[in-house]
Amino acid sequence: MDLYNPLEIERIDKLSETNDRLEDFFTNKREQWNKELEPIFDVLQIANDLEDPKNPTKILDAQAFSLTFKQKLNEENKLFMNKRSRESVKIKKIKYDKLIFYATGFGVKTNLTEKGLLIDAHLAQNERTIEIIDSYLSFLMESIKNLESLGYAIKNMIELLGYLRR
């Protein structure tokens, strides 16, 4: 007995290809964010030489860039949270459709546990999509936390500069 009809196989194959492209897309996005954020964190090395007159300007620039990038990361986080939400709705709809199918049109009597296993097989690629998005969301959240920590470090450096200039 074939559990998957040709349309279901096509849906799963397309989703698998989409997930592969999504992984590549997020890998590129991570690399892009890391390249953009790396120079900002270099300001922490300035703490070794606070006497250089250029350093206060670099510190203030880093503080401004930190806030800007934090906002951009938050916006991107919201964008992909919405995508994740849409994907969750798709999963619920497919679960409902497959439950109805296995309860009424499958032709073989199955218990609830077996129906759950059969439905999970249909949803594997959809769940993979959510896992891929969740992984990127975790990256974004960690980057935001790092920028917040950097903000505190910069604030402390500015206070130290003020104290040393007295």
Image: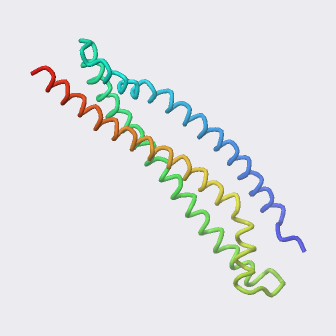
Residue 137 versus residue 101 in the image, above or below? above
Q: Where residue 23 sits in the image (x, y, percent)?
A: 65, 43
Q: Where residue 129 sits in the image (x, y, percent)?
A: 63, 54
Residue lying at the far left of the rendered structure: 166
- Left or right side of 56 for 133: right
Residue 55 versus residue 64 in the image, above or below? above
- Left or right side of 38 for 1: right
Rendered-image quadrant of the C terminus: top left
Q: Where residue 71 sits in the image (x, y, percent)?
A: 36, 39
- Left or right side of 48 for 37: right
- Identified at 24% across, 19% down, the residue is 56
- Left or right side of 86 for 166: left
Residue 62 versus residue 142 in the image, above or below? above
Residue lying at the far right of the rendered structure: 1
Q: Quadrant of residue 46?
A: top left
31 or 43, nearer to the observer: 43
- Identified at 57% across, 58% down, the residue is 87
Q: Quadrant of residue 163?
A: top left
Q: Quadrant of residue 164?
A: top left
Residue lying at the far top of the rendered structure: 53
- Identified at 67% across, 73% down, the residue is 97
Rendered-image quadrant of the N terminus: bottom right
Q: Where residue 85 sits in the image (x, y, percent)?
A: 51, 58
93 or 114, nearer to the observer: 114
